[in-house]
Amino acid sequence: MKILLVIVASFFSSVITAQYDVVAFQDNYTEIEGYHSIALETFGNRAWVKKFELPFNFPYFDYDFDYLICEVEGTCYFEDDLDFSLRLMTFGYKYDEILDTVNIESDVRYKFGEKDGKSYLAVQLTKNRLFSDPSVDEFDSYVNFQYWIFDDGTIELRFGPSNLDHSPVYVPGEGFYLLTNEGPKPAGPQLALYHPYDENIRLEYNDLNNYTEYELTTVELGGINWWPPDGWVIRFTNKRVSTNELASN
C-alpha cells in the first residue's frame, strides 16, 4: 500500500507540473503606454484592490475566467477560490502619495491590448516602494515590474530597473524581509500558481544560487532570493492539460 501511495503521489505531482512550462530569459523592459492609473482611480488609496473585467477568457489551470482580482501585495485571485491563486512576487508594494495629479511618477498602471495576435492585460508597478523600507527618503529605493495575463493562459513577469542597493528590506541571496518592532521577518517574495479549487495543487517557483537558476516544485513553499535585473522575464505557459483528463486515462 505504501508503494502504491508513493507511485500515485509521484504521478499526481508530474501531472500538476505538466500543466505549465516555465522559462526565464533576458529581454528589454518597456513601460506600457495608453494606460489607466490605479492611483488616480482610487484617489490615492495605497491599499488598492482592483477587479479587472477581462475582454477575453483567461485559461488558468483547467478553468476559464473572464475576470481577475488583484491587490497591493502582488496577489491575484477569483471570487470563490480557496486562496490567493496567483502569487506574483507577493510581498507588499506601495506607490507614493499623490502630490501632483498631472505628473505621477509612482503608480500602478494597467492596460488591455493585443500583442502577437494575443489579447492581454498588463499590470505595471511603477516606481513602487517595498513595505517597511526605511531607505526610501534618503536613497529613493524602488522596484519596477509588470505582470502580463494573456488569453492563451500565459503569464509573464517582466522586471524593470530597480534601486535596492541601500534597502535593508532586500538581502541578495535571502530575499525580502518585513521590518517590524520584533525585528526583521523573512517575507518572500513568493512566486507561485495555486489551483483555485484544489488546495493540493500548487506550483512554487524557486530561484537557486542566482536569479538565472530556478526550479518548479509542488512539495514546498517557494521564494525569490535574488531580485531579477532590468529586462529579466519569467514566463509560465499553460499547456491546458486537464488533471481530470489525465487521471481518467
Image (cartoon, grey):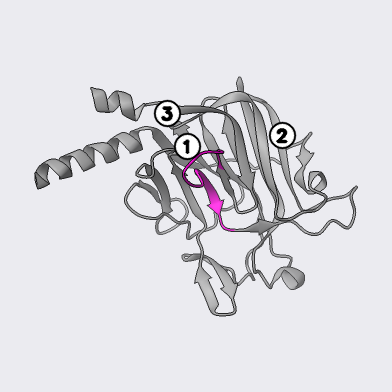
* Mark 2 / mark 1, whichever is N-terminal: 2
Q: Is residue 222 visible?
A: yes
Task: Please identify the quarter of the rendering in which residue 1 is found.
Answer: top left
Residue at figure coordinates x 41%, y 35% from the top left: 21
Q: Amino acid at mark 2?
A: Lys
> Marks 1/3: CA distance?
14 Å
Is 186 on the left-hand or right-hand side of 21? right
Is 21 on the left-hand or right-hand side of 8? right
Name the quarter where the C terminus is drawn.
top left
Residue at figure coordinates x 47%, y 66% from the top left: 174
Which residue is outermost to the front? 80
> Marks 2/1: CA distance?
20 Å
What residue sits right under mark 3 in the picture?
62
Q: Is residue 146 visible?
A: no
Which residue is outermost to the bottom? 182
Q: Amino acid at mark 3?
A: Asp
Circles 3, 2 touching at the beta carbon (< 8 Å): no
Q: Which mark is residue 236?
A: 1
Magenta stretch: helix, strand or loop mostly? loop
Residue at figure coordinates x 55%, y 80% from the top left: 182
Q: Which residues are magenta?
A: 77-91
* Mark 1 / mark 3, whichever is N-terminal: 3
**Dot 2 alpha-carbon crowd within 10 angstroms: few under 14, some 14 to 19, many 20 or more:** some
x, y percentage for residue 38?
Answer: 76, 45
Q: Which mark is residue 111?
A: 2
Magenta segment: does it hold 76?
no
> Marks 3/2: CA distance?
25 Å
Per the image, label 2 sits on a secondary structure element best described as strand
x, y percentage for residue 77?
Answer: 55, 42
x, y percentage for residue 115?
Answer: 64, 25
